[in-house]
Amino acid sequence: MEDFNFYSPTFFAFGKDRENEAGSLVRRFGGSKVLIHYGGGSVIRSGLLDRVKASLDKENIPYAELGGVKPNPRSGLVYEGIELCRKEGIDFILAVGGGSTIDSSKAIAAGVVYDGDFWDFYSGKLIEKALPIGTILTIAAAGSEGSPDSVITKEEGMFKRGATGDAIRPRFSILNPALTQTLPPYQTACGITDIMAHLYERYLTNTTEVEVTDRLIEGLLLTMIHEGPRVIEDPDNYEARANIMWAGMMAHNNSCGVGRSQDWTSHDIEHELSALYDCAHGAGLAVTLPANFTYVMKHNVMRFAQAAVRVWGCQMDFANPENTARAGIEALRRFFKSIGMPGNFEELGAKEEDIPKMVESLCRGNGRGGSISGFTTLTEEDCANIYRLMI
Ligand code: NZQ
Ligand code: ZN
């Protein structure tokens, strides 16, 4: 295990009706004027936005509103939000929605207190200062409710890039599993896939002797394999949704990733797909993971064989562990298909002729030097080969 720091100060309020505590939590964490940020309208239709406003009113906390965050959130709305916050004297941002809304809120929070262009943070600058943020989560997926990360798409060039810094970890996150019951099955499945991807990105490590985090990841993957199909079959199953919601937080606040190197090349590869085709991040990952894993498997066959045995219940083939590793990747592919995720370029709406464009953006765009690295280093040729495996 490697040395590490772990700082995760988010206060979590988990359970039914907890959104009614939004006002008192904003007050507790120092907010006196709030920007309520939300997406394309699901929180209006469900009545959640009205409940949140009532909760702020109860505490006499004034607020401004900015809706319209799109999935794969865009830089344009971030600039608008920064300007609005400065004009209105906002000192706290309340994200009501999914990962896209939370990430847009984080970008605004960092941008408001920064003199330069907020995109500097998405080009590699660490976020050290930001307005405080609270979240009310409506989809278990990205894990942004407990993470120090944000992913934004720059319209100019359509670059989808991440920024990080403990300053953008939410001060509080309200997790009411019942709020996720209105999700369409496809979005629920995208969330399940993203959560599993966050676990796999951490599982693919070059660090040895990481039993505690290995076992945590395996436990969470087993949970997803158990609860995922239950919730797809019965969307109103509160208990299954509750387990998935907490697994989503655990998968990405890095409690499973400390002390070990991590991969994240699958996310880099997928971000080109969702930037170009505007597909759901989880759907892109369902196509990317099996292809990338098949390509990089030989870098450490035993890592994949271990996951196959411990997570997917495969028999260990001691004479040829590669067979076991492959069986585990196939089980993952079958699982994604079983919950309704796409399995190839065609089902995702991606095109073979766009591969050179995606590889160029992936390996050279936004200042990158011709390759991406994680579990192993992938050159432009490797990335093109991985995209071809998705056809
Ligand atoms: O916009 P609204 O109308 O709210 O609809 C959303 C959206 O269309 C809908 N939705 C959310 N909750 C709902 C609901 N519909 C009905 N009932 C509900 N309760 O679902 C759609 C997807 O929402 P979105 O916020 O985009 O989903 P998700 O949480 O999957 O976020 C995806 C974004 O997060 C980034 C992804 O790249 C993508 O841009 N990621 C962020 C990470 C982070 N900050 O740590 C890590 C992840 O790996 C990921 O890259
Ligand atoms: Zn993700």
Image (spheres, rainbow, N blue to C red):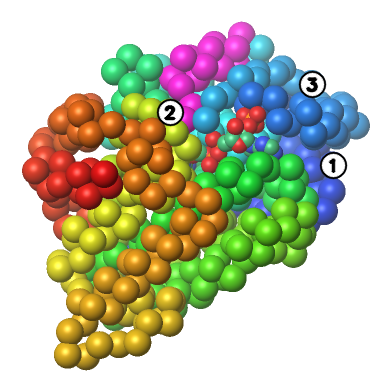
Q: Is residue 139 left or right of residue 302?
A: right
Looking at the image, is 305 positioned above or below residue 160? below
Q: Is residue 57 left or right of residue 372?
A: right
Work out whether mark 2 precedes mark 1 in sequence or the reverse, and give the earlier one.
1
Query: Residue 387: horizontal and vertical position, in percent?
Result: 23, 43
Which label sits in the foreground, 2 or 3? 2
Looking at the image, is 325 positioned above or below residue 344? below
Which disc, if any, is residue 62? 3
Q: Which residues are magenta?
A: 72-87
- The answer to which of 115 and 297 lies nearer the viewer is 297
Name the residue beneath numbered marker 2.
278
Question: What amino acid type is highlighted by mark number 1?
Answer: Asn
Which label sits in the foreground, 1 or 3? 1
Q: Residue furthest right?
A: 58
Work out whether mark 1 precedes mark 3 in sequence or the reverse, and give the earlier one.
1
Q: Residue at x 79, y 43 (%)?
A: 19
Work out whether mark 2 precedes mark 3 in sequence or the reverse, and give the earlier one.
3
The answer to whether marks 2 and 3 mark residues whose Cβ atoms lie closer than 8 Å is no
Pointer 2 residue Cβ closer than 8 Å to ligand 1: no
Q: Which element type, helix, strand or loop, lies under badge 3?
A: loop
Which disc, if any, is residue 20? 1
